[in-house]
Each structure stands twice: as C-alpha cells, then as structure tokens.
Amino acid sequence: MTNSAPPPDRLGRDFLVSLYERMVTIREFEEGVRFLFLEGAMPGTIHQCQGQEATAVGVCAALGAGDFITSTFRGHGHALAKGLSVEEVLFELFGATTGCCHGKGGSMHVGNMDRGMVAGIAIVAGGVPLAAGMALAFKMRKEPNVVACFFGDGAVAEGAFHEGVNLAAIWDLPVVYVCENNLYGASTRVDRVMRNPRISDRAAAYGIAGRTVDGNDVVAVYEAAKEAVADCKSGRGPVLLELLTYRLTGHSRRDACHYQPAEERQEWHGRDPIDRHGRRLIDEGLADQAALDRIRATVVTRFQAAVAEAKKQPQPTLADLTTDVFA
Amino acid sequence: MDVPMRMPDLATTDSPVKVIRWLVDPGQPVMRGQPLMEVETDKAVMDLESVVTGVLSVASVQPGDEVMVGQVIAVFEAEGAAGPVTPPDGTGASKTPPQPPSAPTTGWLGRNAPVPTTKADASRVSFFARNRARREEPTRKRGLPLSIPQKTLARRMTLSQQTVPAFDLQISVNAGPMLARRAAASVGRPIAWDAFFVHAVGQALAKFPDLCHRYEDDRLVPHAVIAVNVAVDLGGDLFAVTVDRPEAKSIEAVSDEIRAGVARLDSGDPHARVTKRAVLTVSNLGSTGVEAFRAVINPPETAVLAVGRVGPAVVAVDGRAVVQNRVNLTLSVDHRVVNGKYAAGFLMAIARALEAIATHEGEPI
C-alpha cells in the first residue's frame, strides 16, 4: 500500500513537485496552527486535516480558476489547495480584518469567492445541496465550470446528502461529490453506521458514476478528479468520488482521539501522503531529498513569517460589527 | 532561559482542566509535541503536549489540581526557544531568524500584555487579548466562579422554578416524642435529627403511594426506587445522602446510614457526590435556628420537606396554654402529581408518625 505507481509522464516534473509543495504547505500550516493553539495564541477550537492533504491537493489540482469548491469545518487544507494564501487563511484564524473572511469566519468558515471557494460550511452535509445549486447556476448560464463538493463519511448519513446528490443527478449537474472517507465520523467508525462501508457504491442508487480511490495517493486522486471533471464538463455529471484517507489528528484540537486503535494509526502513518509522494519523486528521479528539504524549509520560513505578520494584523472594531452581515 | 507553558483552551465550556498525572519528571528533557501530562477536560481524558523543547524545571501544577485556561502549568529551561516548526537540518534553516519564545509572556499575545493607553495602540489589541485581560481582573469585579456542584445546583434549581408548579403546606408538630427517643438512645451516638423525618416520610409514603410518581410528558411515571434524600451542605456545596426504603428500617439504622453517608461525602468520595434518585428530599435547617422555610423541589423528585428548628412554643392543649417543644414542617409538592387534599393527608401522616415515635425501639406505635 505504501508504494505508489509511477506517475504518467505527461504530468511533468514541475506539476508533480508542485503537488508535493502544496501538500507540505498544508501540513506545515496545520502543525504550526496546532502549536499556536496549544500556546494559547489561537482562540477557539480547530479542526485539522493532517494526513488528508492528498485529497484536497489532488482534487483542487484538477480544477480550473473558474471552478468552485465547497468545504466543511475541516477546511484549511481545501482553502490552501484551492489557492488561498497561507497569509489570508492564517489571518482569518487570528480573527484579523485582513483574513479571507475579514475575521468573521474563523477556522471553520475559511473561504474566498474570488479564488473559487465558498466559505466553509460547518453543517455536516450542508454543502451537498448548495453545490447542486451552484452547479445549476453554471448550467443555466451555460458556463463551463464545475463544483467540487468536499464532505466526510459522516455526511453520507444525512438527509441533505440524499436530496442534494439526487437533485444533481436528475438535472445532470456538473458536481464532483468528493467524499473524504477518513473512517471516522467524529469518533464513530464507518463500519458501525454503514452495513456497506463502500460509499462509492451509493452512486448506483442515483444513477451516477461512483469511484473509490486511494485518497493518500495524490496522483491517483488527481487522475480520478480530472476524469470526473471531464465527465461533468461533457454533461455526464455528477460523479461521486470516494477518497480513502485517514486523519492523523483528533477530530478537533480538543479530541483525544482514543477511538483510533494504535495499530490502525501506525498503519496509516506508514501511508502518509506526503512521504509517499516524496519517495515517488525521488524514485522517479524527479527530485532529490535535498530538493524536498528545501521545499519544506521554504514553506516553514513562509509560515513563520506569516505568523509574525498575523500577530500584527488589525482586529475588527465596533464599526465592523454591521459589515458583511445580512441582518 | 526560563520558558513558561500555560494551560491551553482544551475544555469546551470555560470549565477548568483537571491534571491527572505528569508524564515527565522535573529535570527530564522534553521535545516540543511530546506528551507532558494527562489531563481531564469536561469531555475526555487526553494527553497535553509540550509547546517547548527543553528541560522541565518546574511542574507548577499537581495531579488533582483543577487548572484554568491560561494558568502556568510548567516552566522549562530552554536553549533559546523553539519556533513554531523545527525545520530540517542543513536545508537553509540557519537562514531562518530565531523565533520569539513559544509562550511569550509580554506583547500582543502575552497574557500580561499592558493595556494600551493611546487610541492608536488600542486598535491593535485583539478582542481576545482584551477578553483575557478582563478575565484576569480581580474576581470582586467579575464575580466569583461557581464550583462544579454549585453550577449543577444552579441549573437544577432554575429548572425547578421554571417548570415545576409547586404549592406549599405547613404544619407544626410536637417534638416531644423525638426528644424522648434521642434522650433514651444517647448512650452511644445521638440519633441524627434528620433520621426522624426521613423515617416518618418513609412511613407516610407507604400510605400515600400517589406521591411516589413523577410527572413526565403528561404521564405519571412511578419513581424507580422509594428513597428519601437528605440535603447536606458541605462548605457551601449542596449534596444528598440517600436512604432507600426508610420505612423498613429502624430510626437508629436510618440515623447510622445518614451519618455514614455524610462521612463518605466528607471524605471527598466522588461517587458519594453524585445525587441519587429519590421521591423527595428532606432539607433540615433546624440547627440554624430558623422557625420555618420553604425549600425548592429538586427535579425529578416530587416534593421537598423543609424542617425548621425544634424549640419550645406555647400551644393550646385541652383549653390551656402549655409550653411544648415543637417543630415546623413545610411540604412543597409538584401540583402535577397530586392535589392539595392528598398532599395534606400526606403531611398529616408525617406529623402523626413523628408524634407517635416510641421512646424505645421496638415499642408498638
């Protein structure tokens, strides 16, 4: 499992290295934020995605600038993968007015419409019908764009999932439904709540295509997402992609994660998406260890600079209380 | 240099975080990210990871301590200080300027950041920094935080006053028989006053079974156990000692049970501190000297019996004024369970049981 197939030649070295860099950016961001939380510098609780970087990066790499994503409360990785800057996401986590949601979204609602990301939708499965609505807009305006809708395995049990996917299916909407199946809905293992834990099988019930992909192999995710996007753009959407992955951290920073058995954690640590892609780059002669280390060092330096900046960012004032709100 | 670490915001409800045990001893080296101690939040037991790489020099909190978010839990001897992330060696990391201490004590993020005086500075202070400053104001300004049992009590009493339509009945009872029984039995430990009332309540409940129900969604559900609680005030926290089926026991046995229960509460036994189900609570303020009072029903119990002091009073007996030791009982009852007439019968039965107490155990009533 820890070995990944060589990437197709057509992807090119720069692209493959950029996938690595994007994943490292997310990992270092999450690790940095984890300590900022422990140090008391970051308020509120935080839902992190260490271990799931390949799903966000692989899918978003298959999207164009005009394509949109919807995300969840675990959205830092999606945001950074879709092209939001480390700074605008970090500033948002600090509640600064210079954050991507002007400090009003915080960790659970990062997003930036200009970069094709609706602010994170923290209601489980809440993004599924919204993505159908966005895709309907694309279709009615005859715009050739798609929506990638991220959700977790827990969302599949929600009524909104059924309603949203069914609508998208009967109207042939260009939505790639991306289920990040990390085996646990908060603390509940999928096989405790599903008789058939293969989520992609559900696609058949809606008459759409469903595929299960190794979600810790960034190239496999990219290839599958690219195919799904092409299907959507040619009117054969929606598509349900199930990406098998694993959260190497608690559900939130306050979650002790006791429900993940030690052997299972160990096993998935061995499938770390960043390590796997890094090894593949080295094995294929596309990069050496020093180059990968340089990438990480650059990412770390940028993150540290962003933290220093974040601490100096302006905080909302009373006058900001009534801006960006409807009522 | 000394680097402190503070308790992170691991709890969900502003409640304290309890230290279970240290996983590192003072003098031992610690890596950033290494589990430092086991803590218990209002949600779970979890490992707390160090934010510092260094040697643990002071363990500022001890197992059992309830620590507030932001309180210093440890001090480390650190070589310089760890940045947010340790870059791999020899990869340009040396170009990275050293980061400030990972747990700064002053400045924008510091807990002790001075409150800025100029307007220009004020705009730089975050909402959270201001909140933190406010949190650290003397408690006289912000009010004292409630203990966990006090919080529970506050919730239950509010629930009672908002949802239970209660009415009150009052009666004065001759305390002579109780005093006689106490005097006769005072060779060993004196009988706990509460025992008389608990025992009498048990007898009365046997005759008025409708009271052994609680109201729930337009139904009267029988209480699972026929038990009576005794309210116990321990240093400002209210707890209950539960006596099961008191009518089946002697007054002395009930007394022993209550005293043992209070001793368990006193010992800090967490199991004893959990209030068990009962039909009603006896709340006795007799020792304070109050004559009578009204108590609040503790849902899902059906009633509460408030007991005033035992003391001499002038009463009319056979047309003559007589001085007699009396005690006032106030019964508050959930009107959804029984009506006034039934509750009055119940209170009278309690009074009769108290006035019929024999001087010696085993004597026919």
Image: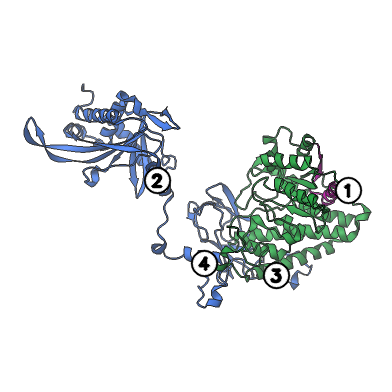
Chain colours: A green, B blue
**Marking on residue A305:** 3
User: Quick one: SS at disc 1?
Assistant: loop
User: Quick one: SS at disc 2?
Assistant: helix
Q: Residue at x 77, y 34 (%)?
A: A205
User: Quick one: SS at disc 4?
Assistant: helix
Amino acid type assigned to the residue bearing label 1 in the image: Ala
Query: Mark 4 or mark 2, which has the lower sequence index?
Result: 4
Can residue A74 be spotted in the picture?
A: yes
- For the residues labelled 3 and 2, say whether their Cβ atoms are less than 8 Å apart: no
Q: Say whether mark 1 and mark 3 are on the same chain.
A: yes
- For the residues labelled 4 and 2, say whether their Cβ atoms are less than 8 Å apart: no
Chain ID, mark 3: A
State the residue position of label 2. B158
Q: Residue at x 57, y 70 (%)?
A: B108
Amino acid type assigned to the residue bearing label 2 in the image: Thr
State the residue position of label 1. A5
